[in-house]
Amino acid sequence: MDFSTLFSGGSAFAAFVSAFFAAISWYQALGSKKAKKKAEEAHQAALAMRDAAVRSAKAAEERARQAEKSLKQMEQIVAEQQKQSESQAEIASHLWRPVFELTWDSGDTYLLCNVTGESVEVLEVANLDKFFRCEQVQQVFRPGESLHILMKGAHGKPLPANLELRIRGVDEVVPVPIRR
């Protein structure tokens, strides 16, 4: 064996080793490309997820704004309904409510009863001249208090439809229907 064969064998061995390492490098490069492709796909997926999260956050903010707007509208509606309720209560408090009730007792006697929850002072019977006979009434009636009144009509002067009373603190005459 001479040196040239030895160097040839060494060169062949070196070429073989180089080819082997070249194959390993090529394999690693191919694996690196696959890893790079996978990394790029993962990066694109992460970007897509980020974009979806941003869209979701924006949608959530919009829903929160809409809910806040709806809440303000509901508060305005409730406030308006409260105002209407208060004004209706005020109107109802000013509506006419009967102060007295007059019911037939027996014969020509009627029962005049205070149907309010407070004392009422009767100053006079305003339409006394419309009766053939009627007693004048001047007294303070406590809540629920009653008084028997004699009222008569006659052939030429029948009982009127109402007993009209003047009451302290009320400018107008208060009509009390006569139920027969």
Image (cartoon, helix red, strand yellow):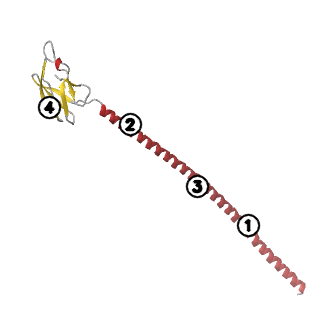
* x 51%, y 49%: residue: 64
- Circles 4 and 1, Cβ within 8 Å, touching? The answer is no
What is the number of the mark on residue 30? 1
- Label 4 to label 1: alpha-carbon separation: 113 Å
- Mark 2 and mark 4 lie on one chain; the one further toward the N terminus is 2
Mark 1, Cα crowd under 10 Å, few <14 / some 14-19 / many 20+, is few
- Label 3 to label 2: alpha-carbon separation: 46 Å
Under tag 1, what secondary structure?
A: helix
- Label 4 to label 3: alpha-carbon separation: 80 Å
| Residue under pointer 2 | 84
- Label 1 to label 2: alpha-carbon separation: 80 Å
Mark 3, Cα crowd under 10 Å, few <14 / some 14-19 / many 20+, is few
| Residue under pointer 4 | 146
The residue sitting at the top extreme is: 156
Under tag 3, what secondary structure?
A: helix
The residue sitting at the left extreme is: 107
- Label 3 to label 1: alpha-carbon separation: 34 Å
Q: Viewer-proximal residue, 124 or 57? A: 124
